[in-house]
Amino acid sequence: MDARRLGVGLHLPQAFLTDAATDYLTDTDYDQLTDDWAEQAFAELAQLVHGKQAPLRRTTPRAPRRPSIPSVLADTLAPPPAGPVFRLADYLEQHGRTTRSRLCPPASFWHAAHTRLTHPDDLRSTSSCSRSTYPGSIRTPPPPAAWPAGWTSRS
């Protein structure tokens, strides 16, 4: 939810989601993780809710199309992400924009964004948001004392 809220594209790399998840967990939940926790989580989130839509579904992005008019950008298309990618259900994206609008993502989110996001637009949007909304670097979230009034930590 935070990735989409902060401007990351529709296709979220599995490695990013897995790495970002750790600081969203309480210490108790983290201590109880099994070796295959990520696979179990992705399998559970891929199941249809009320027979309609999966909260997080695996998807295949379309191959980028080159513009018919040659340009500098046409030669610098971003490579597709390595590994599987997932898409957050629209209703959860909307819910996250509302309920998490005043929350600063945890450190694992920023570290995963720095190390796992490869598309230039994703990197640009998260770094822009980091600089404008959270005074500090993309690699280290700001201390709570530096957060804007009304912001809280975690979920």
Image (cartoon, rainbow, N blue to C red):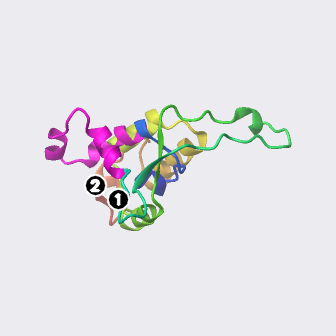
Residue 100 is situated, as x and y percent measured from the top left of the image, at 37, 62
- Residue 10 left/right relative to 134: right
Residue 117 is a magenta residue = no
In which quadrant of the rendered image does the C terminus lie? bottom left
In which quadrant of the rendered view does residue 75 lie?
top right
Q: Picture coordinates of residue 53 (x, y %)? A: 43, 61
Name the residue rendered at 29%, 53% in the picture. Answer: 144
Compare marks 2 and 1 and give the one earlier in the sequence: 1
Q: Which portion, as a residue range, is magenta?
A: 16-45
Q: Amino acid at mark 2?
A: Arg
Q: Is residue 20 visible?
A: yes
Prevailing secondary structure class for the magenta stretch in the rendered image: helix
The amino acid marked with disc number 1 is: Leu
Q: Quadrant of the N terminus?
A: bottom left
Query: Disc 2 vs disc 1: Cβ atoms closer than 8 Å?
Result: yes
> Which image quadrant for residue 140?
top left
